[in-house]
Structures are given as C-alpha cells and as structure tokens.
Amino acid sequence: MSSPEPWQISWVMAEMKYRSVDQIGAEHLGRRVTIRHRLDEGGSSDVLGILEHVDAVSVTVRDKGGERRVIGRADIVAVRVVRSTPQLEHPENPTPR
C-alpha cells in the first residue's frame, strides 16, 4: 500500500476542523460537537452531542440519550464541531437503487 500524497493529508485535516479547547466558545452553543476527553482511570473517550453550556472551567454536552455530560476543560483533548447532516428528501426510501 502506498503512502498518501501530501495534498490528500491536508484535505483530510481541513475537513476534520478540530479545535483546541481554547477555541470552543459561546458561538458554538446549540451546535453538534464531538469532544475527546481524558478518563480518570486512564485513556480517553469521545462524547457526541449538542453543546449546551460553555464557561472557563467546563463544557456541557447533551448526548442523544438526553444525558447531560459535564466535562472539565482541563480534561479535554480535542473538540470538533460536527457538520449538520442534510435532511433526506424521501426518508421512506433513503437508498437509491
């Protein structure tokens, strides 16, 4: 398997749009985000959901089950604002044949 070309890597990185913990703010409230954070027992985990609260100490994300997850900023490794998924025109037949 050959190595990817440099332009392929930069395109993928541009699509990801990861932000440092300092770049997530009030302008992202209500947006869907993925937050990777450190776990107390070691390792890390991702939380995907709607950003509900941001302050200097923590952020709060509501996941798809409705659980509110409060994450300390010191534990955040990376943040990504997720693009909205387009609504299907015909949801009863989502797969074209």
Image (cartoon, rainbow, N blue to C red):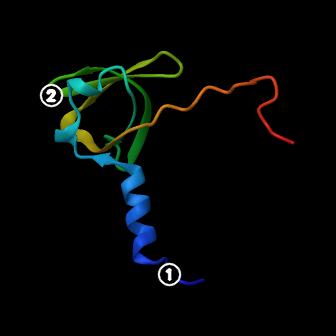
Read off the residue under disc 2: 57
Question: Hey, which quadrant is residue 69 in on the image?
Answer: top left
Mark 1 crowd level (few <14, some 14–19, many ≥20, 10 Å Cα)? few
Q: Is residue 35 above or below residue 32?
A: below
Q: Residue at x 79, y 37 (%)?
A: 95
User: Do residues under tags 2 and 1 come within 8 Å of each other at their CB atoms?
Assistant: no
In the drawing, does residue 36 fall left or right of residue 84? left
Read off the residue under disc 1: 3
Q: Amino acid at mark 1?
A: Ser
User: In the rendering, at what x and y percent does residue 8 appear?
Assistant: 46, 69
Q: Residue at x 24, y 26 (%)?
A: 27
Label 2 vs label 1: CA separation?
41 Å
Question: Hey, which quadrant is residue 86 in on the image?
Answer: top right
Task: Name, please, the residue furthest toward the right.
Answer: 97
Q: Secondary structure at mark 2?
A: loop
Disc sitting over residue 35 in the figure: none
Q: Residue at x 20, y 39 (%)?
A: 23
In the drawing, does residue 23 fall left or right of residue 2? left
